[in-house]
Image: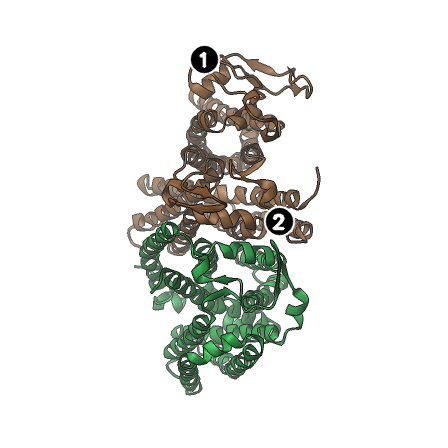
Chain colours: A brown, B green
Amino acid sequence: MELDNTMLARLLTSLTLGFHIIFAAMGVGIPVLISIAEWLGIRKKDPMYTLMAKRWVKGFTVTVAVGVVTGTCIGLQLSLLWPSFMKVAGEAIALPLFLETFAFFFEAIFLGIYLYTWDRFKNPYIHWLFSLPVILGSTASAFFIMTVNAFMNTPQGFTLENGSIVDIQPLAAMFNPATPSKAGHMILSAYTVSAFILAAIAAWKILKGNKHVYYKKALNFTMVLSLIFAIGTAVWGDIAGKFLAEYQPAKLAAAEWHFETKPEAELILGGVLDPVTNEVKYGLKIPYALSILATNTPTGEVIGLDQIPRELWPPLFIHYLFDGMVVIGMYLLVVPLVYFAYKRWKKGEVPRYLMHLIIWGAPLSMLAIELGWIFSEVGRQPWILVGYMKTSNAATKADNVGEMLILFFLLYTFLAVVCTLVLKRMFKNKPAEAEL
Amino acid sequence: MPLETLAITVLWIFLYGYLIVASIDFGAGFFAYYCNLTGRDHIVNGIISRYLSPVWEVTNVFLIFFMIGLIGFFPDTAYYYGTALLVPGSIFLVLQSLRGSFYAFAHYGARNSKAYQFVYGVTGLFIPASLATVLTISEGGFLEKTGDEIVLLTGKLFTSPYSWVVVFLAIVSVLFISASFLTYYADRAKDTAAVKLLRSYAVAWSLPTIFASFLVFLSIHQHNPEHFANMMDVSWMFLLSFACFCGALALQLKKRNYGWAFILVMLQFAFAFFGYGQSHLPYLLYPYITIADSIASPAMSQALVIGLIAGLFLLIPSLILLMRLFLFDARYVEGRPVRK
């Protein structure tokens, strides 16, 4: 791997995004859980749910701060690291980038109001109403940003004529073929990771011996939502698979190590690829599964890498990233189901090993998001704008990208450490039962 | 008015909004740190934190509006400024990140940590200085373009008198604007001790602000004579700015009408900032980018304008609500319990 400007720019971008996405996903998902919890607290007149909302929103402000700060970094780094790309992309896809700032502003204003008006209104529903614009703003933010990423994969809404961008249709650029699958899948996975993180906290407390019913209620609540969102994410992942089959067959073929265009295609999980013969050894081969994923029928034809020019193949290691993400996705479905099985048939006695599994759901879901993103971005190579601009032609020609990489690595390490310490200290010696 | 002029005017309004709101934030952080060092923090900290708590997240967004809007309406700027500002832009991002995250961390963690106070206070001066440097670069003379490559001449930037004068102006303006606002806010909170202290800061930083402004005039004359000539053409704006300054200072010296004094300070900077912006046209980056040459396509510009208007319809009522709840609700400002 040559450390030229392009590679350094890619490394710095992926460092920033890899760090940002965790906080951004929480920023999108946690308000949903907070809002539902507060609503339940009002409806059931159960102060424990209200307390869940109160405590979660406190921790949330710290993660939002890091999300904002890293979001500003990637916002500027788009121009600092990829000026040629931004000049071109700016012509066609500036609109959602612009709208995202409004969505975030809207969210930030109402988050401020929500935080500081807990006991200010006689009617408790008024305060709850302020949680809705927070959800709207953060989900809209995610949507707008995803349209930009979608545009990079299936560009449309402009014409390239003699090196100039003409005939621009901003809405067509935004609502391109990749938008529905990418936006839906990302938003749902943000909701999922948020639910699992909050579930993990409750499970941890129970594992530590906290017997207060607050934690049981919190765990139950978050497990319900974890299951719903995990199902949604998986369904939308299936939609994304079909999208890839039709519009970005190269990405799907590389992810699946599918070399030969054919119907009745099998899905390969894991395995080792022989680089010379393109044969896969030791993998788990599920017959017809790839065709079903791609076309909903076992006999559907799936385009293989034989139809893609060799120099346009994405790196084949993305197969492991894709498989990792999918396997974790299955885990995130199974664990809540097992939890509910125990609740239903064992009269609520949930064994300790399951608490451990639930706790692991938090880091695993974060890992799935990272794997999914790296898969998606590397799977688009060698393009930064598919069919129009290669990544190698888009990076900045300025010096010192390497030094900036080190600088930001230090910054993010610092932020990660301090963020964790602050969150721990925030709730240290302040257990929920003390506030009830 | 041609589309490109409308677009840059709107963006300039956003940047002006950021200038005022962020100055208050930057200055407040610095005053809090300074008071901490001189043992007078008990006087101002209540006021400062009560103001900052709900509002801090909102200030940053104005700047992002400006930057994204600039790239959206004038995509060439992404290429020139993006390439040239890799290092200064990254340093700005690091300072901004430290400041932004420290605020949230300190609010719930080490509020009285010396490190937090220091970072929050010092970034409050470094960030405006670094942002002002971008305006300096826009004047021309600090970029070298060879073919596709744009190089920032950092040596020239560090040794240019104009560059340092602009940094000086940025810093003193931040302190003056912030102190003027905080005096008003403390007065509404009926916190007489804080009013006394903050008013003294406002008065102290008033004359250096005007002095710095004159220095900027002198050095622009030397650095970019074309811009200076344009500024002379709109000299009425700068004269009005000075008049507003005199009015604001008079009220502060007379110890009354701090609200009006702050409005006059806002007008002082509005006239000066728009006078500067007007005379900067048609260049977004002298001499490489003009607004006419680099304006985005009509389709995108129109979409951005519609998005902007829709966004403002959403935001302005929301901001009014925010201000009604926290800035203009006397009970909240005075720290009394608020219940409706």
A15 vs B272, left or right, is right
In the image, residue A207 sits, relative to residue A412, either above or below, namely above
Contact, mark 2 vs mark 1 (Cβ under 8 Å)? no
- Spot occupied by residue A278 in the image (x, y as percentages of width and height): 64, 18
A108 vs B143, left or right, is left
- Residue B296 occupies quadrant: bottom left
Can you name the residue that lies furthest to the right here?
A2
In this orientation, which residue lies closer to the viewer: B139 or B198?
B139
Q: Where the N terminus of chain A falls, by quadrant?
A: top right
**Chain letter of the residue carrying label 1:** A
Q: Which mark is residue A423?
A: none
The Cα atoms of the two marked residues, 2 and 1, are separated by 46 Å
Q: Indicate which disc, 2 or 1, sits on the residue closer to the N terminus.
A: 1
* Three-letter residue code for mark 1: Pro
B120 vs A172, left or right, is right
Front disc: 2 or 1: 1
In the rendered image, residues at marks 2 and 1 fall on the same chain: yes
- Residue A327 occupies quadrant: top right
| Residue picked out by circle 2 | A412
In this orientation, which residue lies closer to the viewer: A155 or A66?
A155
| Residue picked out by circle 1 | A298
Q: Secondary structure at mark 1?
A: loop
Residue B105 seen in render? no
- Spot occupied by residue B30 in the image (x, y as percentages of width and height): 56, 70
Rate crowding at label 2 as few (under 14), some (14 to 19) or many (20 or more) other CA atoms within 10 Å: some
Q: Secondary structure at mark 2?
A: helix
- Spot occupied by residue B201 in the image (x, y as percentages of width and height): 52, 79
In the image, residue B160 sits, relative to residue A190, either above or below, namely below
Residue B288 seen in render? yes
* Three-letter residue code for mark 2: Tyr
Rate crowding at label 1 as few (under 14), some (14 to 19) or many (20 or more) other CA atoms within 10 Å: some
**Chain letter of the residue carrying label 2:** A
